[in-house]
Amino acid sequence: MKLSAFGEKFAGKSGIVELMEDLGEALHSNPDAIFMGGGNPSRLMDVEALFQQRLEALMQDPKQRHSLFGIYQSPQGDIDFREQVATFLKTEYGWNLTARNIAVSNGSQSAFFVIYNMFAGQMADGSQRTIHLPLTPEYLGYADVGLCENFFSGTRPSIDILEDHIFKYRVDFSELHPDETVGAMCVSRPTNPSGNVLTDDELAHLDDIARERGIPLIVDGAYGLPFPNICFVEATPLWNDNIILALSLSKLGLPGVRTGIIIANEEIIDAYTNANTIVSLACGNLGPAIAREWFRSGEILELTARHVTPFYRERSQQTVDWFRAAMGDLPFHIHKPEGAIFLWLWFEGLPITSEELYERLKARGVLVAPGQDFFIGIDGEDWPHRDECIRVSYAQDAEKVQAGVKIIAEEVARAYAGS
Ligand SMILES: Cc1ncc(COP(=O)(O)O)c(C=O)c1O
């Protein structure tokens, strides 16, 4: 088949496609494997029961049932839902929003495709711009969304070594000077893969830099603020008319319903909606139908504070403890777990690459995400750290996570021992 440049780039192999294929194949060939590689949230039965209640209530009401199944909502998303989200955010955080500042997407991933390509790539005047990642490693799912090559630029973080095998990335503002070739900056907060949460000061500083440059700051809140609030440190949600905040219902426990929520100034929302109409026509109704009541009542905050945040906080701490016990004196570092659903491990001076470690672990039935592909925008730089990290999800059943930790420690010990 003869493919266009678009076809060649998107229908071919890419980092994320290969990783997902690998995971799918492992699931098929070894269903007992320990899956610590993907981004599935934990199954929280109390939250699932709430989803069930909402669905049953919808099914009982013929009007709502028809609206769920039988109607294309506006491409921007159901107006009632957008009003409820806007009112909730305005009441809680004082953000100056109406329904015109909100758009619904089929998962936030598809919104990233549209928004990134709206601001970066080949510009109307023929020049080229990038999406700049001020703190990379960043979310692997961004890596391949650009319509052209060299779509990202990035800034290497500084590293604070803390106590007890913990380290933390910080934005290195001394190196962050986005010039006219940057079309927008983007951060995930909490960050996938590292579990870092940018401080309020760091975010405010990024916001200032973006404003000064006249470019938007995109904040990916898939794990965070204000919901699903998988965040274990004090941090304030931030939005203003220069910020595009991308939220999602996925990590609340609804990745299957594919609902993203985009909050931005009206000009950006209108532009996004036009593009999304071409790509998607309309968005799925299920996520908004399930979640609507929780925004209307403000219950979404209580729900996450009671069921979601404490679960992941405890599990992250538990997994760190398991790693400390299993790794003993090995030279390992764990990124300070401040949020999200992963631990990011750094094996300084590891004699094999993280890719090789990943292969060895896979052979032992443990799937992790090797780190090198997360260093988006700085992949050309010579930095050994890039090949010394792995991302480990702790969202699976506790026994599986614990068993996985033990095998990871064994393989890391073997690698350091040179065998
Ligand atoms: C940081 C981050 N952003 C965005 C997404 C996309 O999520 P969804 O398309 O399910 O909303 C993910 C999924 O894992 C993620 O980890």
Image (cartoon, rainbow, N blue to C red):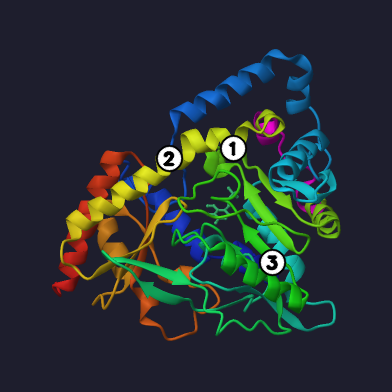
Spot occupied by residue 291 in the image (x, y as percentages of width and height) = 65, 32
Amino acid type of the residue tagged 1 in the rendering: Leu
**Residue positioned 74% across, 52% down in the render:** 263
Q: Is residue 32 visible?
A: no
- Image: 366 above or below 411: above
Q: Quadrant of the C terminus?
A: bottom left
Gap in angstroms between the C-alphas marked 2 and 3:
29 Å
Quadrant for residue 158, please give it: bottom left
Q: Nearer the viewer, residue 258 or 363?
A: 258
Q: Quadrant of the N terminus?
A: bottom right
Camera-side mark, 1 or 3: 1
Magenta stretch in the rendered image = 278-292
Residue 301 numbered mark, or none: 1
Amino acid type of the residue tagged 3 in the rendering: Leu
Q: Is residue 37 visible?
A: yes
Residue denoted by label 3: 217
Gap in angstroms between the C-alphas marked 1 and 3:
25 Å
- Image: 381 above or below 106: below
Say whether residue 209 is left or right of residue 18. right
Give the mark, 2 or 3, whose residue is nearer the N terminus.
3
Q: Nearer the viewer, residue 195 or 233?
A: 233
Q: Residues within 10 Å of mark 3 (few under 14, many from 20)?
A: many
